Amino acid sequence: MIPELRSVGLDFPRWQDALEAAYSTGQLSVTGEIRDGQVLQFDDPSGSRLVILTAPPYGSFASYVGGPQASAHLSMVNDIIGVIDVVEDSPFLQVSGRQAPTIASVTATVAQGPMLAEAEPLEYQPMNIAALATDVKIYANASEFAADGGDRVGTVDSSGLAEINSGSTAPHAAARIAVETSDIALHVSELTGQKFWVASVHTPFDFSVVLPADALEAEVDAVGHTKALGTLILAGTVQFTCSTIEASSCSTGGGCGSGNCGCGGH
């Protein structure tokens, strides 16, 4: 079992099996040319994503696209892992020219990372951020969470960020979360037919938590949303991943952060 794949409805016993299944669809897209290879991407209509790097150092990782949008500064550590500083941006700050405060910082796999690895850091970049469940429990309420040893809710602790300068481990995107959600929906992978859950989280910042189908037993309505569960608490270990979003509101004179757009051009 590979937790990241299982969380996005791509539960294959080996990475090779997942990659072969993606190749067989004929729906791989080339998202970038780097060095002597390419960056390939498979996007399932359910939101699950595979990113494949065919140039050194090679590699592949699971991701998810969709859900709430955040604004963040992004600095790449290598071709795959980046540091995300999520900021509390607002139209007022944009107009006033003031810097937005940082809400939280995490390491994450970055879908566009190979193309950004040698570029300058991005500022006020719109992006989808997701936490792929490695070992996450769902609690019905705060009392149940506390009875299981839980403490504070609304926290994200990035072990990947804490260890990034230690030199003892390779860069990674692991973190521990304890967050609330009242919006959780069932998705179905078109590639595999496997189901998985996607929960929207808004504290301490906007992101999605993606979990395997057996993480929760609940009835859903016609569009996959759970019925009358109230506020749930999700707690455990995850792998953060993100995808940058092109700012369609930017003028042709410059990109996000150039001062010509309404998405954080400070």
Image: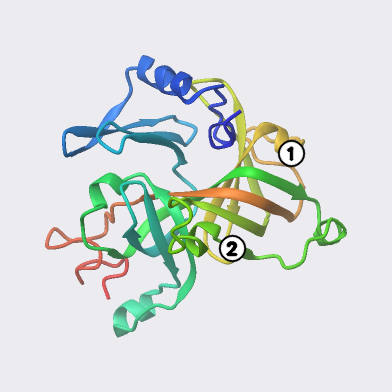
Label 1 belongs to which residue? 216
Q: Amino acid at mark 2?
A: Asp
Q: Looking at the image, which is closer to me, 46 or 84?
A: 84
- Taking the image as drawn, is residue 189 in sight? yes
Pointer 2 residue: 157
Indicate whether 195 appears above or below 63.
above
Q: Which residue is found at the position 50% from the left and 23% from the top?
A: 190
Does dot 1 land on a helix, a strand or a loop? loop
Looking at the rendered image, the disc whose residue lies closer to the viewer, 1 or 2, is 2
Q: Where is residue 191 shown, x and y percent of the image?
A: 48, 21
Left or right of 253, for residue 93: right
Query: Which dot marks residue 105?
Result: none
Q: Quadrant of residue 50?
A: top left
Kindly identify the amino acid type of the residue bearing the numbered disc 1: Leu
Looking at the picture, does residue 116 appear above or below residue 16? below
Nearer the observer, 126 or 41: 41
Q: Is residue 223 visible?
A: no
Considering every residue shown, the one lying at the far front of the view is 168
| Spatial CA span between label 1 and label 2 | 23 Å
Placement of the C terminus among the 4 image quadrants: bottom left
Label 2 element class? strand
Q: Residue at x 31, y 69 (%)?
A: 264
Task: Classify the position of the N terminus by image quarter.
Answer: top right
Q: Can you say whether 135 is above or below 17 in the image? A: below
